[in-house]
């Protein structure tokens, strides 16, 4: 008798003493000795796992009879990378692994893409409505289509999340809340939100509707989850730039579910921090209208065209086991602008990888690349291998391959073989003189979809296995003309198993016939019974779905909701003034001249540039502080506070906790002479968002928010409305606005092999010598030059080619209530700083070409 061993080896005899069995055992033992040294298990950071993470006494599965196919060899981990990932494996131990697989979340830019996603095995989809979504060029869904989409998904045990992931202006808040009302009425399972002000209003109006923090909120550490949890959020979408070790920390140390992008287009800029398209091209990426300037060619030092901002698409298909072990709640596929064939093809592969808990093989990666790629894929951010290999452009060959691959993917989309069907049990009861009765039973939800933490698995058992049962009746069965013509179980199963086009499939052996004997039912009547039972089963399951509109306030209370969510927080003395208040941020200490020290009441330097003896009054925290860097930043901030820094500029909700800890370390908890400000990176565009930032600051640090720099995307009328209604609000009235925040070093790529004497080691290399210079210039096709500066963590910032300047229009600013005025000094020499200050004092132009606030 042939048997398959647990390791996959086939044996021809079950006897424990047979020669074949002995050879198999010896082979297993030799493989156990050989495999660990030949293929040592590594995490995606390249580091070998610590022995202490394995549970003692856990029985390991038999190794395979042949060596497993290797993926690309892991990059050798340096000592620095090992230190960075030292917390990775303790956070990913098998005893804290999720009981169920992560949710597979697919994009649905159209109804056809939604059907393809569920046909391919998606657990959930995310889609956009007619407004406030970051893919305004997609088909999107009107109210009727949204309701149909939710019904279609829920009938299949799936979920639908609506994206409200754009910034919302003050006067648009009522429309945003009404959009949420409509989504709740349609039955969506949650909202993906990028504006904290809109989130605050929606939470008050619809307390039962789950909120997910969009990646546009720039969440990149565990503290982000802890900051948002008290304000109605149940999940946050972590930044695509997050490494595995930081991802594991966010899951282990945060109270919220963590959603991770695993495939699709990759922006070079941190999400939510890109103003390039908006301020240069007039199309705001934060409003769903990105013109993708990152895909355009630029010029390097030698004038040659290059694409330093165009990244290959992300794919973590080779890291599915690591993601499962990390405990993420949802794996998200990007692509609302893609075709249904693409959505179905990518979703199908990730469904298979998840179900089999394995990494993609070469064939699967090749098919994903054929569907869509820009010269291949990258996992550089996830693994920490951030280099030139991450860049790529879409070639004609890529486009030709995609056309063929999409045809293949479309052919594979067969609803009859959809992996997400629900098993149905059927019982047909035939009694003489009584109507035929068909009873069907099916689970409420798809089995294995979604994540339940191990600690909650027992409590979730009832929900996960809950079923719905319905019974429908038909005509009275007739007596069979002959005994052999009586309806049998096999005959009934043939008719009842025809469930194509529905989310149901008859379970194997799941059909039972209870009959008095000698009775039959015509096939047409059986078909009618089957259709009626399936419709009733769907209705019964839908009726038991959670109601997201439960507890909602009546629409007439909307004005009061927005007023309450937008009420200004108290501002400490000095935060609101009847006279202009001037503050400034500088890149280098030498820019803070004597004139600057006299003119600006707040003078900020980057934390890394802080010096003990200087003219700066405070520091600006780095815009990105992942968990692996938090300890060093905390120590540096503590040192700056002890040395006299009293003004702190913070640009992310996940950084307030670090400020609180540093204040405690420096012995300054509750000190009223420490002043906290919100950076323009908070993207405040409405009163409710300003209030939320003030609430977060006070809740976490115990100190008030003295002011917040409003979004540079706001026009003069919108700045006027906000500055008048929210004391402490300020606007940038001079300086080069930061357009991009890059995790990847662009400076190195702008100096390929250069012999510029200013560059140590002659140019770019493995040590990134060019970047030591600290600045470069990005030239576009029109000749405009965008300064690029290195910042903390070897990140880069791209600044606008021209500065904003309103120094000669002080009367316009005053007339519009803009009294708190912020200056940004980046590449200016000290003499230029003095000239700008003189211009502000006298109300004259600074000279040269500038941009205006319109």
Image (cartoon, rainbow, N blue to C red):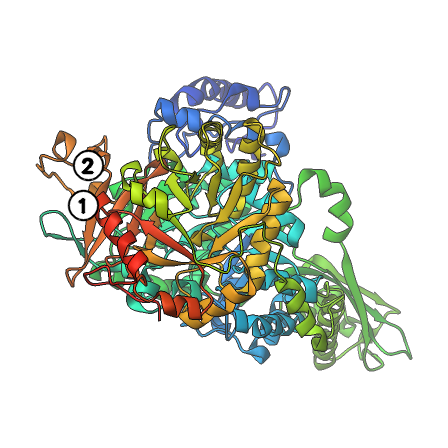
Please tell me which residue lies in front, 751 or 393: 751
Q: Quadrant of residue 621?
A: top left
Q: How many marks?
A: 2
In the rendered image, the vertical position of residue 12 relative to residue 711, given as above or below: above
Q: Which residue is mark 1?
A: 750
Residue 54 drawn above or below residue 530: above
- Pick the quarter of the image with the C terminus: bottom left
User: Closest to the observer: 252 or 395?
Assistant: 252
What's the residue at 76%, 74% (across, down)? Answer: 485
Judge by depth and name the residue closer to the eye, 187 or 722.
722
In the rendering, which numbered label is found on residue 770?
2
Q: Are marks 2 and 1 in contact (CB under 8 Å)?
A: yes
At mark 1, the secondary structure is helix
Q: Is residue 54 visible?
A: yes
Q: Residue at x 47, y 41 (%)?
A: 647
Residue 614, quarter of picture: top left
- Helix, strand or loop status at disc 2: helix
Residue 97, percent across and down?
Answer: 61, 36
- The mark nearer the N terminus, 2 or 1, is 1
Tell me where residue 442 appears, x and y as whole percent: 73, 61
Q: Is 324 on the left-hand or right-hand side of 519?
A: left
Q: Position of residue 544 (x, y in %)?
A: 76, 65
Residue at image location 84% in from the left, 69% down from the top: 429
Where's residue 720, x and y in %? 47, 69
Q: CA distance from mark 2 to mark 1?
A: 9 Å
User: Vertical placement of 737 versus 173: above or below?
Assistant: above
Relative to 303, 670 lies left or right: right
| Mark 2 Cα-neighbour bin, 10 Å: few <14, some 14–19, many ≥20 | many
Quadrant of the image for the N terminus? Answer: top right
User: Can residue 404 be seen in the rendering of this structure?
Assistant: no
With 196 as the anchor, is 749 left or right in this view?
left
């Amino acid at each position: 008798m042939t048997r398959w061993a647990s390791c996959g080896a086939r044996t021809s005899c079950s006897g424990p003493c047979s020669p074949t069995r002995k050879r198999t055992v010896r082979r297993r033992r030799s493989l156990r000795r050989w495999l660990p040294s030949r293929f040592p298990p590594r995490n995606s950071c390249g580091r070998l796992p610590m022995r202490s993470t394995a549970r003692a006494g856990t029985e390991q599965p038999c190794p395979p009879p042949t060596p497993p196919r290797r993926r690309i060899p892991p990059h050798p981990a340096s000592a620095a990378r090992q230190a960075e990932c030292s917390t990775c494996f303790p956070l990913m131990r098998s005893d804290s692994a999720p009981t169920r697989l992560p949710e597979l979340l697919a994009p649905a830019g159209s109804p056809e893409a939604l059907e393809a996603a569920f046909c391919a095995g998606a657990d959930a989809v995310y889609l956009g409505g007619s407004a406030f979504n970051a893919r305004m060029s997609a088909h999107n869904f009107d109210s009727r289509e949204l309701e149909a989409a939710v019904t279609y998904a829920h009938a299949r045990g799936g979920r639908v999340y609506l994206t409200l992931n754009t910034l919302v202006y003050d006067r648009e808040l009522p429309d945003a809340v009404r959009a949420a009302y409509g989504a709740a009425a349609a039955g969506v399972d949650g909202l993906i939100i990028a504006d904290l002000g809109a989130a605050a209003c929606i939470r008050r109006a619809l307390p039962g509707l789950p909120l997910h923090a969009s990646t546009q909120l720039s969440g990149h550490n565990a503290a982000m989850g802890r900051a948002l949890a008290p304000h109605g959020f149940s999940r946050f979408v972590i930044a695509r730039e997050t490494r595995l070790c930081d991802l594991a920390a966010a899951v282990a140390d945060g109270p919220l579910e963590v959603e991770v992008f695993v495939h699709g287009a990759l922006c070079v800029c941190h999400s939510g921090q890109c103003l390039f398209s908006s301020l240069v091209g007039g199309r705001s990426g934060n409003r769903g209208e990105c013109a993708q300037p990152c895909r355009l060619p630029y010029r390097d030092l030698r004038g040659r065209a290059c694409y330093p901002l165009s990244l290959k698409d992300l794919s973590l298909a080779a890291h599915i086991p690591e993601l499962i072990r990390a405990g993420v709640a949802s794996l998200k596929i990007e692509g609302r602008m893609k075709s249904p064939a693409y959505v179905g093809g990518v979703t199908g592969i990730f469904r298979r990888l998840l179900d089999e808990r394995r990494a993609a093989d070469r064939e699967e990666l090749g098919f994903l690349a054929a569907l869509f790629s820009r010269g291949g894929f990258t996992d550089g951010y996830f693994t920490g291998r951030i280099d030139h290999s991450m860049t790529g452009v879409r070639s004609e060959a890529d486009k030709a391959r995609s056309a063929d691959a999409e045809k293949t993917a479309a052919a594979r989309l067969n609803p009859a073989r959809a992996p997400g069907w629900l098993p149905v049990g059927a019982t047909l009861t035939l009694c003489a003189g009584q109507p035929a009765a068909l009873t069907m039973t099916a689970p409420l939800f798809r089995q294995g979809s979604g994540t339940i933490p191990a600690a909650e698995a027992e409590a979730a058992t009832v929900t996960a296995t809950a079923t719905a049962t319905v019974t429908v009746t038909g005509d009275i069965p007739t007596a069979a003309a002959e005994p052999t013509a009586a309806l049998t179980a096999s005959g009934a199963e043939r008719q009842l198993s025809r469930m194509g086009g529905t989310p149901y499939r008859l379970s194997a052996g799941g059909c039972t016939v209870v009959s008095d004997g000698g009775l039959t039912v015509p096939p047409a009547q059986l078909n009618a019974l089957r259709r009626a039972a399936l419709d009733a089963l769907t209705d019964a399951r839908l009726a038991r779905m959670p109601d997201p509109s439960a507890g909602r306030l009546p629409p007439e209370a909307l004005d009061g909701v927005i007023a309450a969510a937008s009420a200004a927080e108290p501002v400490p003395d000095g935060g609101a003034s009847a006279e202009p208040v001037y503050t400034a941020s500088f890149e280098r200490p030498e820019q803070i001249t004597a004139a600057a020290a006299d003119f600006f009441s707040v003078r900020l330097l980057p934390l890394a540039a802080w010096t003990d003896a200087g003219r700066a009054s405070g520091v600006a925290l780095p815009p990105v502080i992942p968990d692996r860097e938090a300890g060093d930043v905390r120590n540096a901030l503590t040192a700056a506070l002890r040395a006299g820094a009293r003004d702190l500029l913070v640009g992310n909700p996940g950084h307030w906790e670090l400020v609180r800890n540093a204040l405690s370390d420096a012995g300054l908890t509750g000190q009223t002479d420490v002043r906290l400000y919100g950076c323009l990176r908070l993207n405040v565009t409405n009163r409710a968002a300003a209030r939320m930032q003030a609430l977060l600051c006070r809740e976490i640090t115990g100190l008030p928010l003295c002011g917040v720099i409003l979004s540079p995307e706001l026009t003069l009328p919108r700045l006027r409305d906000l500055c008048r209604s929210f004391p402490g609000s300020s606007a940038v009235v001079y300086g080069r606005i930061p357009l991009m925040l890059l995790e990847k070093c662009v400076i190195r790529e702008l100096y390929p092999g250069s012999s510029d004497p200013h560059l140590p080691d002659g140019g770019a290399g493995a040590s990134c010598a060019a970047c030591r210079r600290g600045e470069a210039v990005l030239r576009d096709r029109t000749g405009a030059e965008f300064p690029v500066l290195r910042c903390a963590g070897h990140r880069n910032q791209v600044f606008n080619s021209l500065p904003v300047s309103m120094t000669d229009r002080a009367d316009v600013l005053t007339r519009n209530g803009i009294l708190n005025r912020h200056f940004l000094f980046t590449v200016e020499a000290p003499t230029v700083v003095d000239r700008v200050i003189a211009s502000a004092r006298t109300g004259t132009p600074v000279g040269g070409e500038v941009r205006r606030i319109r």
